[in-house]
Image (cartoon, rainbow, N blue to C red):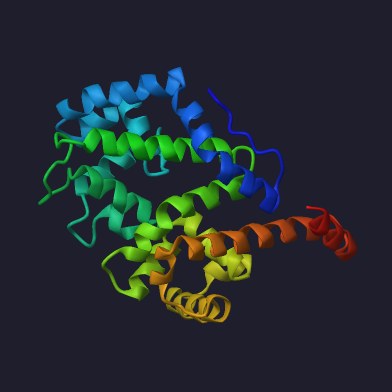
Amino acid sequence: MFTPVIPTTGLSGWRFLQRTYDVQFEAFSQSTQLNRITDNFAEKIGEIKTAEELVADRQVLEVALGAFGLQDDINNKYFIQKILDEGTTNEDSLANRFSDQRYADFSKAFGLGPGEESRLKLDGFAAEIIEKFRANSFEVATGEQDDNMRIALFAQRELAELAESDVSNDTKWFLIMGQPPLRSLFEKALNLPESFGQVDIDQQLTVFKQRATSVFGSADLEQFADPDAIDDVITKFIVRSQLAAFNSSTSSASIALTLLQA
């Protein structure tokens, strides 16, 4: 399988990845292994009727989970079946009890819970899931070399959609807090400590909004419907991550020199 090329870390590495993304993603998408499992998904998903049938086919499940960044749960079949069987219409369903929004998004996308309509036979459903799977798989492969690049790619793909979603601004912040990659992005871009996630959730919301107002001029997440605003938050994330890495191993003078040389 094609391995994404990132010749350097930090902002220069991110800019290179941006410039070459289309070419690299196309090469990655031509992988025989990737095409084999996506073709299998497209062929079988319309015949599946229940969550039990879905989790029973490992290759189908691999694509289904991978599309939502949940590939690490591939062996937790009982757990995933329960997520799908309970759906999201009930506030007390398992998917809705997780702070990680990806589980609810995953369950809702397939529509196998009570009071939901299965989406598995809908025109375009297989293509939609496969597209998300390919994008996420490329991000995972990138993250194996530099996890900051994986987070940045995820934000570039997902943040605008969240910013334009038809929910309140506070709900958008809670969704960010429930998406591990986006949470990491904003915590670092806003220079929040690693222990920040341990405080009360409502207090976290207040601090996120205060810091966003200070750093971006506004706490309104609609601003990230603008690609320039997304580029700004990603740049801040990459630079602060680079500085943190340098701080752990070099002196302040060395950091300044390295950044100037980059």
Residue 112 rendering spot, x and y as whole percentages:
17, 43
Residue 243 placement, left or right of 42: right
Q: In terms of depth relative to the viewer, which is nearer, 167 or 201?
A: 167
Residue beneath the point at 31% across and 22% down = 39
Residue 124 rendering spot, x and y as whole percentages:
20, 36
Q: How many marks?
A: 0
Residue 73 rendering spot, x and y as whole percentages:
41, 39
Residue beneath the point at 30% across and 74% down = 168
Residue beneath the point at 35% across and 58% down = 161
Work out whether residue 72 can be spotted. no
Residue 15 rendering spot, x and y as whole percentages:
62, 49
Residue 116 placement, left or right of 53: left
Q: Is residue 21 above or below residue 242?
A: above
Work out whether residue 54 can be spotted. yes
State the image quarter where residue 175 is shown. Answer: bottom left
Residue beneath the point at 57% across and 76% down = 215
State the image quarter where residue 144 is shown. Answer: top right
Q: Is residue 88 above or below residue 123?
A: below
